[in-house]
């Protein structure tokens, strides 16, 4: 029996080696070039079409807005039917590669802005360049430059942030500082002075909170990525915004090995040493951390705007939100943030005109109002559509301020296909004092420079 | 007529062989093929020969991953075997009342999906979870820690979950084996004045050699292909201190777009599992003969 097994395994190996002659991924044909094609924005004249749309708007308000907008679209264009497939972010991320390289790709997909997803798809000619439609529909007027940059790549996928437009987002996201008003007053911290103050005022507040016996910052970093959202705002204080943008977009010309980046890492490690975090952040679940904050343990929580609905449900009027304060009074605010996943058109789609028209429809000014009504933060008209009160009023205002007057910085894990893993593990090492700030920046530099060199 | 008959069995087997070939052999061949390329799963690929295999030895994270898998064998196979032998020997010797119930309870972790097990243990290991609460309750505050965030303790903590799951399987297997041993043998041993321990080493242990081989085969495979447990409890962290080969395969193939590297790890893992099991079975068969 063992001899047979040996024979079989040898045969399998040999067959694999023989097959090596025909390379995987070599069978795909070149997609039609978008430049030579006539585009049309007259959707009603396109005839009967079924558009397949893959999105990840599965949760309450997200699903609601999608349903409403799809119905409105089909009412406006009875000749076009939307065939919607909605799945979780993780499922979409892992199935999209197969779907786009298969024979029957969907027409419209939500593709993550990152190098590993949108960048890789653009490099492999799987997404349609939407620039001609952007001109026709006036998208450059509708969107701010920094928002459009997040779904812009060069045609070869090498440069991120410049070149062709490959998708449009519906919603905005911002990473900032949630705080508990009750905890602030218990620690003797003045809320108005804090939100209108500087970064130094914020770090002083951390010390006051600790002196008052509170947990200054809740962090659940079991999965590694939550600490990226704490590091991002700190980095924004130390490192010039254009350098962070280059590092986050994985473009050549920047380096992690700078004194500023090291200072940012040192500040985060200093927070750990000062005992500003809850016990064992690396062993604490993300959901458990924000839930503890919601239950009243903790003064601050540094995290994304997507937590607002749950925190407001738990804390009501007690929870407030601010963008990380600037280094100097009156200065520009810089923080991690961006957009929800952009909607893109696949290169294979035979219905490109209808698909682009659909994306225009669900990102229009009217659509922004629908998004706001259903509890989402629209990426455009944000300040205008802000709710009157509550934590979402703070968040809408902060996003409007940072995206228009400050620097909305890319997520650092967008930089390379492996960066999410690399930075997550590196931050866990840094927080656990397994590495020092210099070693931390070196690990990130290795990942970044290896990718840039390949470019 | 005779000619026809010789091929007839294969005709009956054909559907199964086709399925086996289509869903097992073909993907395996393709994996070997992919492992020789650098490919992102999307565009064109580049033939790199055995570079992806060389990486298995040069990439620190990968070396560590295989090292962790070997540590997990201790927790998934060796510990459950020792525990299972003791428990089964006791249960077999003393005619415990409610043996059926006990067997079921011990076997229960095997029935649960690993993801369910992992989610439950993630709660137990949480900083204010069951384990730390229990330790504090009995005054062992000094032993409490963030089990899934501690560089020394996380891998053993994950391993213990494996021990918890596999012990039941091993115990039930061994109990079945011990049940086959004729009562007269034990009686004879007792008449000769053998104690429980002597009896165990002279009769029980040699007679369940076959079951031990089966148990080791199953648990070693489980240890080496661990994925869901790590994915749910730690995601390979903190740092890279609990990452395992199967987790790296998933990460590289589906998240990082390094299909060739993922395939090379998968092929190497398959080979290691295969070789280890051949060795286990050789030893067991050899001694029996």
Image (spheres, coloured by chain):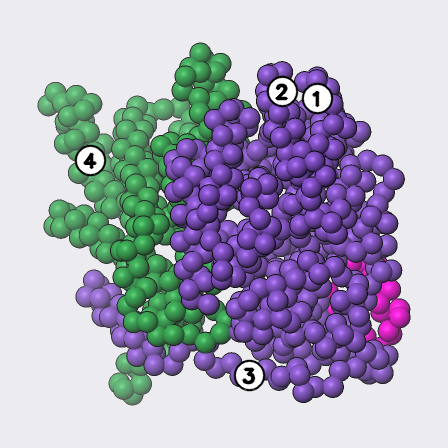
Of the pair A454 and A314, the residue shown nearer to us: A454
- Observer-side mark, 4 or 2, equals 2
- Tell me the residue that label 1 is attached to: A189
**Which element carries disc 3, helix, strand or loop?**
loop
Q: Earlier in the sequence, mark 2 or mark 1?
A: 1
**Residues at marks 4 and 3 touching, judged by CB atoms closer than 8 Å:** no
Give how far apart the Cα atoms at labels 3 and 2 are.
61 Å
Q: Earlier in the sequence, mark 3 or mark 1?
A: 3
**What hue represents chain B?**
green
Chain ID, mark 3: A
**Residues at marks 2 and 1 touching, judged by CB atoms closer than 8 Å:** yes
- Observer-side mark, 4 or 3, equals 3
Tag of residue B277: none
Whether callout 1 and callout 4 share a subunit is answered no
Count numbered badges in the picture.
Answer: 4
Which residue sits at x=55%, y=70%?
A157
Q: Is residue A34 above or below residue B40?
A: below
- Tell me the residue that label 4 is attached to: B205
- Tell me the residue that label 3 is attached to: A30
Q: Which residues are magenta?
A: A66-84
Whether callout 4 and callout 3 share a subunit is answered no
């Amino acid at each position: 029996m063992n001899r047979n097994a040996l024979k079989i395994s040898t045969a399998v190996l040999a067959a694999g080696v023989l097959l090596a002659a025909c390379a995987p991924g070599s069978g795909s044909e070149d997609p039609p070039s978008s430049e030579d094609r006539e585009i049309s924005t007259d959707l009603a004249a396109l005839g009967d079409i079924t558009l397949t749309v893959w999105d990840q708007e599965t949760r309450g308000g997200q699903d609601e807005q999608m349903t409403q907008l799809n119905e409105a679209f089909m009412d406006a264009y009875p000749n076009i039917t939307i065939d919607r497939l909605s799945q979780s972010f993780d499922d979409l991320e892992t199935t999209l590669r197969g779907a786009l390289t298969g024979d029957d790709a969907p027409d419209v997909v939500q593709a993550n802005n990152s190098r590993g997803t949108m960048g890789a798809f653009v490099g492999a000619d799987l997404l349609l360049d939407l620039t001609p439609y952007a001109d026709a529909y006036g998208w450059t007027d509708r969107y701010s430059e920094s928002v459009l940059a997040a779904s812009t790549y060069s045609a070869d996928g090498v440069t991120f942030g410049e070149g062709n437009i490959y998708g449009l987002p519906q919603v905005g996201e911002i990473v900032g500082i949630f705080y508990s008003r009750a905890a602030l007053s218990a620690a003797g911290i003045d809320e108005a002075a804090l939100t209108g103050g500087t970064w130094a005022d914020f770090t002083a507040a951390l010390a006051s909170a600790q002196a008052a016996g509170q947990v200054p910052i809740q962090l659940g970093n079991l999965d590694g990525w939550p600490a990226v959202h704490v590091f991002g705002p700190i980095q924004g204080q130390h490192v010039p915004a254009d350098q962070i943008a280059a590092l986050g977009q994985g473009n050549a010309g920047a380096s992690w090995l700078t004194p500023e980046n090291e200072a940012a890492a040192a500040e985060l490690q200093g927070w750990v040493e000062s005992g500003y975090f809850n016990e064992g952040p690396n062993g604490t679940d993300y959901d458990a951390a924000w839930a503890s904050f919601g239950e009243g343990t903790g003064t601050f929580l540094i995290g994304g705007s997507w937590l607002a609905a749950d925190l407001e449900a738990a804390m009501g009027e007690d929870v407030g939100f601010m963008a990380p304060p600037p280094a100097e009074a009156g200065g520009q605010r810089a923080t991690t943030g961006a957009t929800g996943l952009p909607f893109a058109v696949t290169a294979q789609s035979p219905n490109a005109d209808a698909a682009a028209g659909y994306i225009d429809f669900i990102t229009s000014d009217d659509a922004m109002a629908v998004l706001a009504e259903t509890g989402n933060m629209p990426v455009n008209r944000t300040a205008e559509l802000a709710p009157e009160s509550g934590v979402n009023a703070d968040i809408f205002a902060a996003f409007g301020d940072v995206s228009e007057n400050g620097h909305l910085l890319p997520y650092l894990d967008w930089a390379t296909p492996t960066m999410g893993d690399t930075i997550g593990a590196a931050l866990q090492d840094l927080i656990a004092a397994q590495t020092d700030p210099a070693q931390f920046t070196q690990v990130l530099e290795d990942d970044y420079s290896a990718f840039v060199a390949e470019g | 007529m005779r000619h026809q008959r010789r091929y007839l069995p294969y005709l009956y087997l054909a559907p199964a062989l086709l399925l086996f070939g289509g869903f097992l052999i073909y993907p395996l061949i393709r994996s070997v093929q992919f492992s020789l390329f650098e490919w992102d799963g999307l565009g064109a690929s580049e033939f790199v020969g055995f570079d992806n295999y060389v990486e298995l030895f040069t990439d620190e994270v990968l070396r560590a991953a295989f090292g962790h898998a070997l540590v997990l064998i201790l927790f998934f196979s060796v510990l459950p075997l020792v525990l299972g032998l003791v428990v089964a020997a006791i249960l077999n010797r003393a005619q415990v009342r409610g043996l059926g119930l006990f067997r079921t309870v011990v076997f229960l972790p095997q029935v649960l999906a690993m993801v369910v097990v992992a989610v439950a243990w993630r709660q137990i290991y949480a900083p204010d979870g069951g384990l730390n609460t229990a330790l504090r309750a009995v005054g062992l505050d000094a032993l409490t820690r963030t089990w899934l965030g501690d560089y020394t303790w996380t891998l053993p903590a994950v391993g213990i979950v494996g021990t918890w799951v596999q012990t039941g399987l091993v115990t039930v297997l061994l109990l079945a084996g011990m049940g086959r041993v004729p009562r007269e043998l034990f009686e004879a041993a007792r008449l000769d004045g053998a104690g429980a321990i002597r009896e165990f080493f002279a009769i029980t242990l040699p007679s369940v050699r076959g079951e031990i081989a089966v148990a080791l085969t199953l648990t070693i495979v489980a240890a080496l292909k661990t994925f869901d447990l790590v994915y749910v409890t730690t995601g390979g962290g903190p740092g890279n201190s609990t990452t395992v080969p199967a987790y790296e395969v998933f990460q590289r193939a589906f998240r990082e777009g390094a299909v060739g590297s993922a395939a090379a790890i998968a092929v190497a893992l398959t080979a290691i599992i295969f070789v280890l099991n051949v060795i286990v079975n050789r030893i067991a068969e050899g001694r029996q003969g």
